[in-house]
Amino acid sequence: MRSVVVSFFAAFILAVTAHPALAGNILDYQGQCVPFAREASGIEIHGDAWTWWGKAKGRYERGSLPAIGSVLVFAKSPQLPLGHVAVVSRIVDHRVLMVTHANWSRIDGERGHVERDVTLVDVSPDNDWSEVRVWYNSNDGLGATTYPIYGFIYGETVSGRDVHASPQITERHPDYVGSLIDAYGG
């Protein structure tokens, strides 16, 4: 009986401490992009962001087309030595998305905050989502840097809807018009 009780408590403690920073509202999270993307998307990959693309092979579907709840994997670059991952929250048009991600912009002078439904634009010459620009809080608009992208990792879906993505990844009424203005000027 004692070993059963000890096993139960060990399992309970492990479950409670597995994601302590992400307990409750995922938008309150402050930290790195990887734990946030894992929790928000349900895609169970660990390691630096740029490694997600290779680690997803054979475990999750991957592709070059965005889907709500999918994880966009940024390649390692001089600006992003560990890469970056962001969760697709809305598809605005064929070249504009909204993403929810952590640890991108400085907010109130600090990094690590979650930003929800920020504009991301495909700027690749072949319209294939291989290069993007991302909304940056300090600019109050799109950043000037172009980032190389590996592609999108798709979680488990039912009828085209990601069954594991958190409903908190998007606003109830996101600013589609603002996103299009960010992307195309106006």
Image: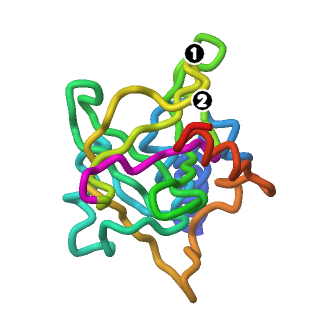
Q: What is the x, y in percent for residue 88?
A: 52, 57
Q: Secondary structure at mark 1?
A: loop
Q: Nearer the viewer, residue 48 or 179?
A: 179
> Can you see residue 68?
yes
- Indicate yes or no whether the magenta region holds residue 5: no
Q: Residue at x 53, y 25 (%)?
A: 105
Q: Residues within 10 Å of mark 1 (few under 14, many from 20)?
A: few
Q: Is residue 6 visible?
A: no
| Residue located at (30% from left, 70% from top) | 62
Task: Specify the amino acid type for callout 2.
Answer: His
**What's the residue type where badge 1 is placed?**
Glu
Question: Which residue is labeled 2 in the image?
Answer: 113
Q: Spot the residue most to the front.
A: 186
Residue 118 located within the stretch drawn in magenta: yes
Q: CA distance from mark 1 to mark 2?
A: 8 Å
Rendered location of residue 148, percent (x, y): 25, 43
Q: Which residue is tagged 1?
A: 110
Q: Main secondary structure of the magenta part?
A: strand
- Identify the secondary structure beneath mark 2: loop
Q: Is residue 136 above or below residue 69?
A: above
Q: Residue at x 60, y 29 (%)?
A: 113
Q: Position of residue 122 (x, y in %)?
A: 39, 51
Q: Residues within 10 Å of mark 2 (few under 14, many from 20)?
A: many
Mark 1–mark 2 CB contact (< 8 Å): yes
Q: Quadrant of the C terminus?
A: top right
Q: Is residue 60 above or below residue 124?
A: below
Query: Which numbered disc covers residue 98?
Result: none
Q: Is residue 32 left or right of residue 146?
A: right
Is 95 on the left-hand or right-hand side of 109?
A: left
Which colouring convention does the figure follow?
rainbow
Q: The magenta stretch spans which residues?
A: 117-126
